[in-house]
Amino acid sequence: MVVTVTPNPSLDRTVEVAALVRGAVLRADASRVDPGGKGVNVSRVLAAFGHPTLAVMPGGTGELATLLRAAGIQPVSTPARGTTRVNTALVEADGTTTKINEPGVELHAHEVAALVDTVAAHAAPAAWVVTAGSVPRGAPDDLHARIVTAARRGDARVAVDTSGPALAAAVAAGPDLVKPNVAELAELVGHPLPRLADVLAAAADLRGGGIDTVLVSLGAAGAVVVAPEGTWHTASVPVTAVRSTVGAGDSTLAGYLLARTSGASPADALVHAVACGAAAVGLPGTAVPGPADIDISSVKPASAPEESLDLTGEAA
């Protein structure tokens, strides 16, 4: 079982248009609504591969809960006032995505406590607890850190995917895995990371501080994992038709955890992660990949990183 925690869940509405023209009346080519939020997306990938998962979130009732159950995910709702936010993505024909994210519900102190206590209650039987996404209004910057500590009480391994002050606080709480992209990692360490060598040095510092595994998505340059067993990099898969980049990082993390919980090495898990992330880019909206969507053979085997690789200009 993998438990995901999404402090700021959403309904993700995706509208496809030929081209986005500011101030114009546009006709949509297609639209769809998916359950959203970074932790929710991880659960959706896991469920698509038949892996048991439940999704903890404030609110998350009504349409969101219905969509999650239809995807084979058990939703676990904690108290929250207000309705689930709706995030809108406008996707152009060339894959360019413009997102408008609503602020979401505001959590008060007792609702934050209820969320953390619920994680603690479900962590004991879990192989992993994944806490991911933005911190909602009213919640403290150390919310993910509190979730890390609560999951630890249940003896679960913990993965974190967030950014900014929330990531810094979560790292201090000592999760087993963190999954930033290059920009998020650079913000965390306080300086640019123009080369792969710089990313590896930053990841090594995190490991020296007690983080077991650092998985960094590099955008078009693929991904790198720094783990106790070693360090590996693999390039991204060329995508012929980019449908939407939303949720690709979530699919990458889910792909890595799927492989690791099945006994794969970090190197092989990295290949599976990149395959899942690439497959997500080719799907509409925030649709997530399943077994039929990924092509492991299209991903180069993970190898020792080429530290001189220039990351400037790579979307991460």
Image (tube, rainbow, N blue to C red):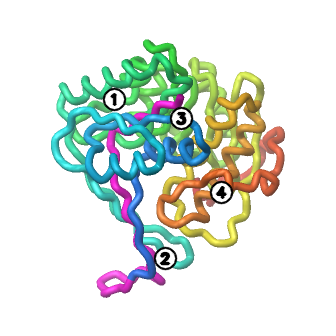
Please give the label number shown on residue 92: 2
Q: Mark 1 = which residue? A: 143
Nearer the observer: mark 2 or 3; the answer is: 3
Q: How far apart are the two marked residues, 1 and 3, measured between alpha carbons?
A: 25 Å
Q: Earlier in the sequence, mark 3 or mark 4?
A: 3
Please give the label number shown on residue 278: 4
Q: The magenta stretch spans which residues?
A: 1-27
Residue type of the residue flagged with mark 2 = Glu
The magenta stretch spans residue 12? yes
Q: Residues within 10 Å of mark 4 (few under 14, many from 20)?
A: many
Q: Residues within 10 Å of mark 3 (few under 14, many from 20)?
A: some
Residue in the image at 62% along x and 32% along y:
214
Q: How far apart are the two marked residues, 2 and 3, measured between alpha carbons?
A: 34 Å
Left or right, residue 194 beside residue 141: right
Q: Quadrant of residue 196?
A: top right
The kind of secondary structure element at disc 2 is: loop
Q: Mark 3 = which residue? A: 52
Q: Residues within 10 Å of mark 2 (few under 14, many from 20)?
A: many
Nearer the observer: mark 1 or 4; the answer is: 4
Q: How far apart are the two marked residues, 1 and 4, measured between alpha carbons?
A: 30 Å
Percent position of residue 155, x then y: 50, 14
Q: How far apart are the two marked residues, 4 and 2, measured between alpha carbons?
A: 18 Å
Q: How far apart are the two marked residues, 1 and 2, measured between alpha carbons?
A: 35 Å
